[in-house]
Amino acid sequence: TVPAPELLSAELVPDTLDMDTSKGLLTRVTTSVGLNERDLRDAAADQVILTAKQSAIEQGILDDAAREAELRLQTFLNSLPQTGDEQVIYQIVARPPSGF
């Protein structure tokens, strides 16, 4: 068996999240309680990343990754030269994902 696939990281592509927080009511409220605009943008970016991760999991990215890892590793191992008269056939199985 191989370890279960997992999302290790997710990042926004630089310059792809254009957000103006200077005129909104939320900005006025958050700045009055001590958060600045940068903190608000960072929190929004974190929420976008979290939503993207959840969406990827719901769309089956971990299942696809598991199948691809199984196939590639199995193909590689079965292509290795073998010695002796008996043929060894490798079968690879990924552990199920542990969840998000």
Image (tube, rainbow, N blue to C red):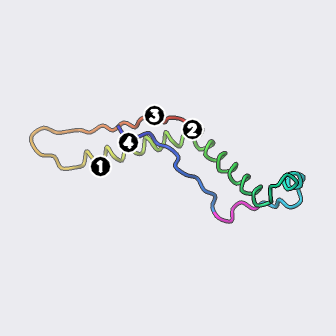
Give me the disc on residue 76.
1
Give me the disc on residue 70.
4
Quickly name the residue at label 2: 100
First reached walking from the N terminus: tag 1 or tag 3: 1
Secondary-structure class at tag 3 = loop
First reached walking from the N terminus: tag 2 or tag 1: 1
User: Which three-letter amino acid code belongs to the residue tagged 4?
Assistant: Glu
Q: Quadrant of the C terminus?
A: top right
Label 1, residues with CA under 10 Å away: few <14, some 14-19, many ≥20: few
The correct choice, above or below, for 36 with respect to 2 in the image is: below
Picture residue at 47% right of the left edge, 44% below the top: 65
Task: Indicate yes or no whether the magenta region holds residue 34.
Answer: no
Q: Residue furthest front?
A: 34
Report the side of 64 relative to 15 (left or right). Answer: left
Label 2, residues with CA under 10 Å away: few <14, some 14-19, many ≥20: few
User: Which three-letter amino acid code belongs to the residue tagged 2?
Assistant: Phe
The segment highlighted magenta reads 14-18
Q: Are marks 1 and 3 in contact (CB under 8 Å)?
A: no
Horizontal and vertical percent position of residue 41? 75, 57
Picture residue at 54% right of the left edge, 35% below the top: 99
Q: Quadrant of the N terminus?
A: top left
Label 4, residues with CA under 10 Å away: few <14, some 14-19, many ≥20: some
* Front label number (2 vs 4): 2
Horizontal and vertical percent position of residue 79? 24, 48
Secondary-structure class at tag 1 = helix
Secondary-structure class at tag 4 = helix
Q: Residue furthest bottom?
A: 15
Horizontal and vertical percent position of residue 25? 90, 52
The Cα–Cα distance between marks 2 and 1, rounded to whole angstroms, is 30 Å
